[in-house]
Structures are given as structure tokens and as C-alpha cells.
Image: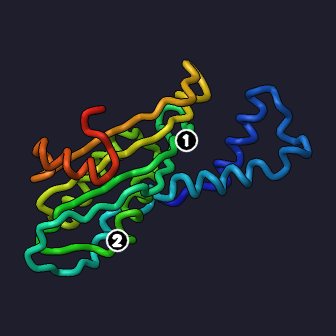
């Protein structure tokens, strides 16, 4: 289902009115359009299948070493407050019989992040998508993010950072997971 820009624009005008502002003020003349454009981008993952990014694979022989990508930019919207959370994802997998181009992993992360999300679910979804699309021997995904719903409201914890971890297969074993997290620059003893 496509994002309804006209409804988003109308919703912004209603939101402005609901907080006591006049949506007809000159300062707001382009706000509804800009808001709709931003939200179309924020939620573009709703109309994409993350597995599509893993369809073109390369067969490999006996590869025993891990593929590790760190510091993949994450921008998502908390489904509870529709406020952003920003951070990075670190992804590792032990190839089975196939690998994928390195640029495809950030595409998977972005597709899943560009939906109303909870960080915990996002981390699990990235791991599950890699398992389903690549059939690896193991996967570890770590997402580190700052949530604006925590920083800008409520307890106003501007320095807090949330870390979530999902592991599958051989990388669920504590020693293997710790080794990979060390390569990622994540200290396993903090979790």
C-alpha cells in the first residue's frame, strides 16, 4: 500500500491546530508538504521486502571465516511515539554455501529500519532476514541507538544508548559470539 501524502498533509494541518497553532500562518505554508515527504522517506520500508536484497548471491566453497560489517547507519522511528532513534548496526555472518555483495547488508538494515519499529524487533528482524536469505551457519546482529523518545521527553536521558543483540546458529555459542562482538568493537561483558 502506498503512503497517502494528501492524508499526511491534512494530518499535519490538524496537528498544528490541535496544539493551538494556526496552520494557515505563512511560516507553515510548506510544512505539511515537507512533513509528508519526510514521512514517506521514514516509512519507505513498509513497501519493500528486505529479502529482495539477498536474492542475488554468490556461491562459495568452504568458507569458514566470518563476514563482518560494522557501523551501518540506522535511522528508524519508534512505533510508540513516532520519534526517531538513530545509531549503528553491526552485522556478522558465517557463510554457508553463499555470500551476498557487501552493499546488500546495509540495504537489508535500511529496509527494516524504515518502518515504525522497536529496536529490539529490528535487531531480530535483521538476523532472521539474513538467516532466511543466506542460510548462513551463524549470525550476530548488534544495534546501538539513541532514542529521541528517551532523550527529548520523559526522563530526558540525552546520553543513554540502547544496545540490542540477536544471534543465530553457531554464533549463538558464547565463545563464538564474544569473538565476533570483539571484532565488531562491542564488549560482550556489558550485555
Residue located 52% across and 60% down the image: 2
- Secondary element type, mark 1: strand
Residue 126 position in % (x across, y down): 31, 53
**Res 49 seen here:** no
- Where residue 22 appears, as percent x and y from the top left, is 86, 34
Name the residue that disc number 2 marks.
Answer: 102
**Which one is in front, 126 or 116?**
126
Q: Which mark is residue 173?
A: none
Q: Residue at x 37, y 57 (%)?
A: 70
Residue 97 seen: yes
> x, y percentage for residue 46?
44, 55
> Picture coordinates of residue 98 (x, y %)?
17, 74
Task: Give the CA distance from mark 1 to mark 2.
Answer: 26 Å
Is 133 left, or right, of 173 in this rendering?
Answer: right
Frontmost residue, 155 versus 18:
155
Q: What residue do we see at 10% from left, 79% from top?
A: 61
Badge 2 crowding class, 10 Å Cα cut-off, few under 14, some 14 to 19, many 20 or more, is few
7 left or right, relative to 24: left
Please rate how many residues cluster around mark 1, counting C-alpha atoms within 10 Å: few if below 14, some from 14 to 19, many from 20: some
First in sequence: mark 1 vs mark 2:
1
Q: Secondary structure at mark 2?
A: loop
Where's the C terminus, which quadrant? top left
Q: For mark 1, what is the residue? A: 84
Amino acid at each position: 500500500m502506498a503512503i497517502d501524502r494528501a492524508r499526511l498533509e491534512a494530518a499535519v494541518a490538524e496537528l498544528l491546530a490541535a496544539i493551538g497553532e494556526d496552520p494557515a500562518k505563512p511560516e507553515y505554508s510548506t510544512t505539511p508538504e515537507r512533513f509528508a515527504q519526510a514521512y514517506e522517506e521514514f516509512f519507505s520500508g513498509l513497501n519493500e521486502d528486505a529479502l529482495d536484497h539477498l536474492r542475488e548471491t554468490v556461491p562459495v566453497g568452504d568458507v569458514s571465516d566470518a563476514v563482518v560489517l560494522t557501523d551501518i547507519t540506522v535511522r528508524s522511528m519508534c512505533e510508540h511515539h513516532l520519534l526517531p532513534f538513530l545509531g549503528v548496526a553491526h552485522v556478522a555472518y558465517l557463510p554457508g554455501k553463499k555470500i551476498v555483495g557487501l552493499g546488500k547488508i546495509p540495504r537489508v538494515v535500511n529496509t527494516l529500519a524504515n518502518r515504525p519499529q522497536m529496536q529490539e524487533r529490528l535487531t531480530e528482524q535483521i538476523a532472521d532476514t539474513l538467516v532466511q536469505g543466506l542460510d548462513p551457519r551463524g549470525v550476530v546482529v548488534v544495534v546501538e541507538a539513541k532514542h529521541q523518545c528517551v532523550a527529548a521527553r520523559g526522563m530526558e536521558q540525552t546520553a543513554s544508548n540502547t544496545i540490542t543483540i540477536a544471534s543465530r546458529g553457531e554464533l549463538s555459542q558464547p565463545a563464538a559470539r564474544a569473538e565476533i562482538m570483539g571484532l565488531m568493537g562491542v564488549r560482550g561483558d556489558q550485555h
